[in-house]
Amino acid sequence: MKKYLVSIALLSSVSATAFAEEANQGWSGEGQLSAGQTSGNTDTRDIGFGLKLAKESGKWTYAGEASADYGEIDGVESKNRIFAAANVDRLITDRMFGFGKISHERDEFTGFDSRTFAGVGLGYHVFDGDRTKWTVRGGPGVKYDEVKAIVVEGQPTIPADSETSFSVFAGSDFSHAINEMVTFSNLTSVVYAEESTQLVNTAAVTSKFSDKLSGRVSYEVRHDTNPPAGFEETDSATRLSLVYGF
């Protein structure tokens, strides 16, 4: 755990410097450190680190994010999740756009060694005001899942497996500034496939301490309609985060 905390601190320092340089080249975004409580497949306290970047260039918008969460119970690892994603959007009209998306996730405590999705589609800015923003997007793609081998006491071993499937992605990104200091946001994503569907919803309230520094309280629900044998369908996480915007 100590090694992980040191790694988080070093990564935060290096990333803050790198992103400060990127901000001068037209990039904007945020970095956050969080502490939370997870329930579902694991009941544990965890710490996390997240980064988001975005840049607009004419009709093009480039965006990326990465996050890592780690937890222990009595010195035994109980959570270890890494996620990364990238989007490229191009405006077609003032509100409609086309996009390409790729994401990769590793979370062994949900029974999956990894999950990868790549797809394209169309999106629409439903609201794009100063206080309220809402963007929806969706389209087809390909999902690749790697399921880890499972040994169940008294039962045969469930071997490792992998599956590639056609899928459909849908997403919603909503935010509303309650006042100059407080913002409510709700982010939803669904990846549908015949063998299983994954849904993630994150609701958050962010309060500014200064122009750059904010505090955030969030609640995330992750649901899988057909998880590997022995694993639960739903995980939830409550987090308190310190957020630095640039």
Image: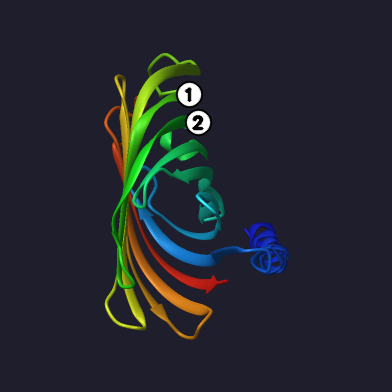
Q: Amino acid at mark 2?
A: Thr
Residue 149 visible, this orientation:
yes
Q: Secondary structure at mark 1?
A: strand
Residue appearing at x 62%, y 64% in the figure: 26
Residue 201 visible, this orientation:
no
Residue appearing at x 40%, y 18% in the figure: 165
- Horizontal side of 120 relative to 6 (left or right) equals left
Query: Residue placed farthest to the front in the image?
Result: 93
Q: Quadrant of the N terminus?
A: bottom right
Q: Quadrant of residue 22?
A: bottom right
Q: Quadrant of the C terminus?
A: bottom right
Q: Quadrant of residue 9?
A: bottom right
Residue appearing at x 56%, y 64% in the figure: 28
Question: Relative to residue 71, is residue 81 depicted above or below?
Answer: above
Question: Relative to residue 161, is residue 79 depicted above or below?
Answer: below
Mark 1 or mark 2: which comes first in sequence?
2
The number of numbered discs placed on residues in the rendered structure image is: 2
For residue 144, the mark is 1
Q: Do tag 1 and tag 2 residues touch (Cβ < 8 Å)?
A: yes
Q: Which residue is mark 2?
A: 116
